[in-house]
């Protein structure tokens, strides 16, 4: 167990669905927590990522001592933030270079991510602050 005051929180894989991608997102969350432990420790809330394709939604629960990453299991789940779009568009948004917690408009990948949001290919509903913090955690 990591020191909750200085190190990154523990990142755990929960439920995995046959059509799930939580294990892939777990790698991004673990990497982000290792690179930005303060950001990971300060995150609180529930995030659900839904895909246009036939993948199970991924749920991220940022708690006091750990981060749980799991595939949705069909039960209703109360989320503070919902991100929806195709898997490639969501990953592009999540890994775009940022400035001020938003995709960087001076970078080609940042502009592409912003264009996906503007065209509603990626939809974000919920806390804008939580969205910026989650994107900062996942930034490559």
Image: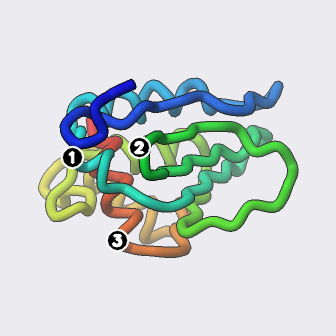
Gap in angstroms between the C-alphas marked 2 and 3: 19 Å
* Residue contact between numbered discs 1 and 2, judged by CB atoms under 8 Å: no
Looking at the picture, tell me which residue is in the foreground, 115 or 93. 93
Q: Earlier in the sequence, mark 2 or mark 3?
A: 2
Q: Residue at x 56, y 39 (%)?
A: 68
Q: Which mark is residue 129?
A: 3
Q: Residue 87: horizontal and vertical position, in percent?
A: 59, 41
Q: Residues within 10 Å of mark 2 (few under 14, many from 20)?
A: many
Q: Residue at x 49, y 61 (%)?
A: 45
Q: Residue 37: horizontal and vertical position, in percent?
A: 24, 39
Location of residue 114 (image quadrant): bottom left
Q: Residues within 10 Å of mark 1 (few under 14, many from 20)?
A: some
Picture layout, residue 35 above or below residue 105:
above
Looking at the picture, tell me which residue is in the foreground, 20 or 78. 78
Q: Earlier in the sequence, mark 1 or mark 3?
A: 1
Looking at the picture, tell me which residue is in the foreground, 38 or 138. 38
Q: Which residue is mark 1?
A: 38
Q: Is residue 9 visible?
A: yes
Quarter that holds the N terminus: top left
Q: Which mark is residue 52?
A: none
Q: Residue at x 27, y 29 (%)?
A: 34
Q: Residue 8: horizontal and vertical position, in percent?
A: 29, 34
Single out the mark in the foreground, 2 or 3: 3
Colour option used? rainbow
* Residue contact between numbered discs 1 and 3, judged by CB atoms under 8 Å: no
* Disc 2 secondary structure class: helix
Q: Residue at x 33, y 28 (%)?
A: 2
């Amino acid at each position: 167990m990591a020191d909750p005051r200085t190190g990154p929180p523990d990142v755990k894989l929960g439920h995995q669905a046959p059509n799930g991608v939580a294990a892939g997102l777990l790698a991004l969350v673990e990497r982000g927590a290792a690179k930005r432990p303060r950001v990971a420790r300060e995150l609180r809330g529930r995030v659900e990522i839904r895909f246009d394709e036939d993948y199970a939604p991924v749920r991220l629960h940022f708690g006091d001592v750990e981060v749980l990453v799991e595939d949705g299991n069909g039960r209703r789940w109360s989320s503070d933030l919902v991100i929806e779009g195709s898997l490639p568009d969501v990953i592009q948004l999540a890994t775009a270079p940022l400035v001020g917690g938003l995709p960087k408009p001076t970078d080609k990948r940042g502009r592409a991510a912003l264009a996906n949001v503007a065209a509603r290919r990626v939809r974000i509903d919920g806390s804008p602050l939580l969205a910026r913090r989650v994107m900062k955690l996942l930034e490559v």
